[in-house]
Image (cartoon, helix red, strand yellow):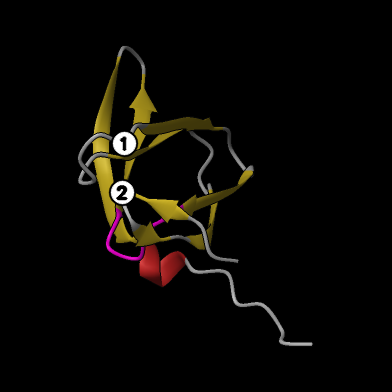
Amino acid sequence: MVALINNSPKILCYYTNHTNQIQVARITNIPDWYFERVVFPGQRLLFEATPSAELEIHTGYMASSILSDHIKCDRLRLQTNPE
């Protein structure tokens, strides 16, 4: 699967919230591109991004959130079986 964001190929990525807290997944290092999703406990998130994109995971606590992880989207690439 190849598509373009700012003339860069996209990859299919996969993230799972393994915590019991609500998380916000955000990509902020790609200029002129917005990606932000709420990920509930146990929820799986499939998304497309460039291999150089970084997924920020913000974990919610009471009235605030903490940046709890930075993950390169290349590490979240969904492996598909060639047919």
Q: Is residue 19 left or right of residue 27?
A: right
Residue at the far bottom: name it: 83
Identified by mark 2, the residue type is Asn
Rate crowding at label 1 as few (under 14), some (14 to 19) or many (20 or more) other CA atoms within 10 Å: few
Q: Position of residue 53 (x, y in %)?
A: 30, 55
Q: Which residues are magenta?
A: 49-53
What residue is drawn where x is 28% and y is 51%? Answer: 69
Q: CA distance from mark 1 to mark 2?
A: 8 Å
63 and 71: which is toward the camera: 71
What residue is drawn where x is 67% and y is 77%? Answer: 80
Q: Is residue 34 left or right of residue 32?
A: right
Give the dominant element type of the magenta stretch: helix, strand or loop.
loop
Location of residue 33 by image quarter: top left
The vertical placement of 28 against 62, above or below, is below
Under circle 2, the secondary element is: loop
Q: Position of residue 59 (x, y in %)?
A: 36, 34
Identified by mark 1, the residue type is Trp
Q: Position of residue 28 (x, y in %)?
A: 24, 39
Reply yes or no: does residue 4 show up in magenta.
Answer: no
The answer to whether marks 1 and 2 mark residues whose Cβ atoms lie closer than 8 Å is yes
Location of residue 56 by image quarter: top left
Q: Position of residue 61 (x, y in %)?
A: 35, 24
**Which mark is in front, 1 or 2?**
2
55 and 11: which is toward the camera: 11
What residue is drawn where x is 20% and y is 40%? Answer: 31
Kindly identify which residue carries mark 1: 33
Q: Is residue 58 left or right of residue 22?
A: left
Q: Which mark is residue 6?
A: 2
